[in-house]
Amino acid sequence: MKESQKILKVALDVPLDRLFDYLNNGQAFTVGQYVKVSFGSRVLTGVICGFANESLLSEDKLKKIMHVEPEVIFDNDLLRLLEFSADYYHHPIGQTILSIVPSRIKQNKYQLRVKEIVYKATNELTIEWIEALPKRQVTLRKVATKLLGEPIRKTALKNIASNAGKAILDLVETGVCFSEEWREETSYKDDIRPSLNKEQQLAINSIKDNNSFVPWLLYGVTGSGKTEVYLHLIEKFLGEEKSQILVLVPEINLTPQLESRFRVRFPDTNLAVLHSNLSDIERLDNWRQAKSGAASIIIGTRLAVFTPLNNLKLIIIDEEHDPSFKQQDGLKYHARDIAMVRARNNDIPIILGTATPSLESWLNASKEISKYQLLRLKARAALDASLPEIKTTPLNSNKDQPISPLILKALKRRIELKQQSLIFINRRGYAPVLVCSSCGWSGSCHQCSARLVVHLKDQKMRCHHCNYECPIALQCKECGNTDLHPLGSGTQKIEDQIKALIPSANILRVDRDSMRKKNALHELYEKTHKGDIDILIGTQMLAKGHDFPNLTLVVVLDADNALYSTDFRASERLFSQLMQVSGRSGRGSLAGEVLIQTSFPNHPIFQAVKAHDYELFANTILAERASIDLPPFSFHAVLQAESKQLVLAERFMDDIANWAMTSKETVKIFGPVRPVMERVNGLERIHIYIQSDKRKHLQNMLKVWIDQIRQHPLANRVKWSIDIDPMQ
């Protein structure tokens, strides 16, 4: 044991912003190894983050490491990134570090996933070979016959015969079949490389020879071939020895289609996928492949930005504008911003791809700032493909029937032409509220400041914030009236109405309720690409990233809802959402059409969407934000307190708001104030907003303030958290 490793600095998953000292048990350790330690009455998994010769505590008060695993979770470079994240987002260092550790490691479950095996016939297996087998070898003949028709997965052998496992091994030994790891087939059968247009080639040429840190904003209209640019650049960077590429996507539903494209283009390259839809053991297996360097391409959602990668050469962030990259609890990081820091630390290029850049990225790519290099893809990549024609259409006069005659006619016309349609309504469930026709009572969640959403198929009313549910009310809770009406529309209601209006249509609803099964997204892509679906009805899960060449009509319902939002980012999100969902139409050689239902057809947002003019919209909104000093021209933080007792939260927030007012830094304090959602999951909420023109001033103020907050007598009785660069 080295004298310099006498004291181990260990990160633990506890809400204290410090590392904990433990005595070395005589071994040699490495930063990033995980250990078992005693902490009070508990045994916790910790990670070694450093060493020291001495501790503030005497040695007789220090505990020894109980157990150490040889595996190293991360190196010094990733530790540096985690330390930055904990410091910038003001989150305890131990909880920051342990948040990236796979759950099975924290649960002491280290075994890898048992890989699924599939058996395939060789050319030696023929009908004649099977006929030559002795008649008494019934199982062997049965397995061989089945294998001749199609590959057999190991898990399916028991369905053939109880002793089929032994029979398949006999066939392998005789050389008439072989085994390999099973991989689910994708919808893409052939790697047909499309010809690059001049803009795509220019983008590739601009990036491919630059191996150092440069942020590239790849701004391309929907269907402009940004993914093809990614693929060409990945191919180039993979040419370097032991290279690894990290591709971040905002949501799980974008990974299957992207994974399919990548696997077909790079069939001999190991690819690892990381997202929350994987089982814990699958995620650990893929994480270890990435960490060891066995996986060269890593595709994942926001947490994948912290994946240990020793040979990282390029980072790609697809749909960089998407708010899903921002974590909303725990360590409230933004994956795009963390990826930018990681790329700078590693001195590698980073690509931000989108059809509707975030205003922060657009400003950074402007001539005045020039922090990012801007590359434009102005035309659709597919031959003869053009941007869809976007029209606004008035709301139907019958409020109980959102589908107007004009929209119905357009849907029927697409079915006649054997083309596909998409109806977008960003609200799941049957109806957003159940209302009494007599006194106006509406079903409300007793735990949240929210209405209960009607889910007619389940005969439930459900809160979409805390998941509380109850049977649909049969009479008014206030006056006893039995005449209750579901008001408004959700995906389930639209699905029922379309089925009634067009009984022959094949309809698929796509929302969180219908896509709960593990392979539901794969089934969606297969059915849609095969032409089995006439009309897709869905929420924002369908709004971006999907490529369905035969889809020529997009209908947007209830688009006006976002216009009434109090969030200053609402207009930016609405424009992005409309442009993204409109981009699903006409991506092939067939012309596309978009119908947006609105009561305000002359609103600037709808006018900009119809003109496909992101730049006009972005520059207009930036001018507005600059005039009133809103992000990205200022920097914000929100401190949120929650308590079952409102009086405790109020007393706590009043005190710390007064402390904030005494700061010597140039900051503005707003609040305490109740947010729009005053109560969630039984907890009363209060916010304090902090704003500064300088990021440094905001960070300096928060460091001092948060240290003060931790000393407040109510700090452990009130649940509080800080959100840096909040998105909502």
Image: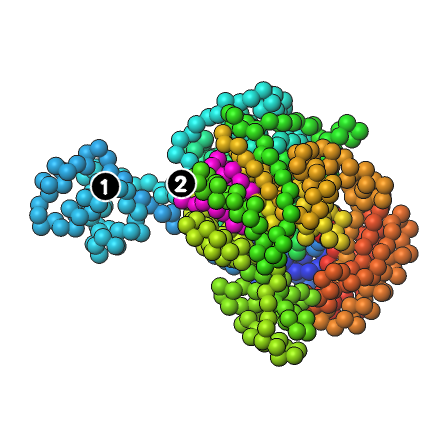
Question: 685 left or right of 313?
Answer: right
Q: Front-most of 296 and 353? A: 353
Q: Residues within 10 Å of mark 1 (few under 14, many from 20)?
A: few
Q: Which mark is residue 149?
A: 1
Corner quadrant of residue 654:
bottom right
Q: Pick whichever of labels 2 and 1 is earlier in the sequence.
A: 1
Residue 177 seen in the figure: no
Across and down, in percent, residue 339 comes to: 65, 39
What residue sits 62% from the left and 79% below the top? 480
> Residue 550 lies in magenta, yes or no?
yes
Across and down, in percent, residue 136 comes to: 9, 50
* Vertical placement of residue 440 versus 136, above or below: below
> Residue 101 lies in magenta, yes or no?
no
What residue sits 56% from the left and 37% below the top? 593
Disc tally is 2
Give the residue at mark 2.
530
| Badge 2 vs badge 1, beta-carbon distance below 8 Å | no
Q: Which mark is residue 494?
A: none
Q: Front-most of 272 and 681? A: 681
Q: Give the amino acid at mark 1.
A: Gly
Across and down, in percent, residue 179 comes to: 29, 41
Q: Front-most of 243 and 501? A: 501
Corner quadrant of residue 484:
bottom right
Q: Residues within 10 Å of mark 2 (few under 14, many from 20)?
A: few
Q: Give the amino acid at mark 2.
A: Lys
Secondary structure at badge 2 equals: helix
Secondary structure at badge 1 equals: helix
Question: 236 left or right of 337?
Answer: left
Look at the image and give the residue range highlighted in magenta. 531-554
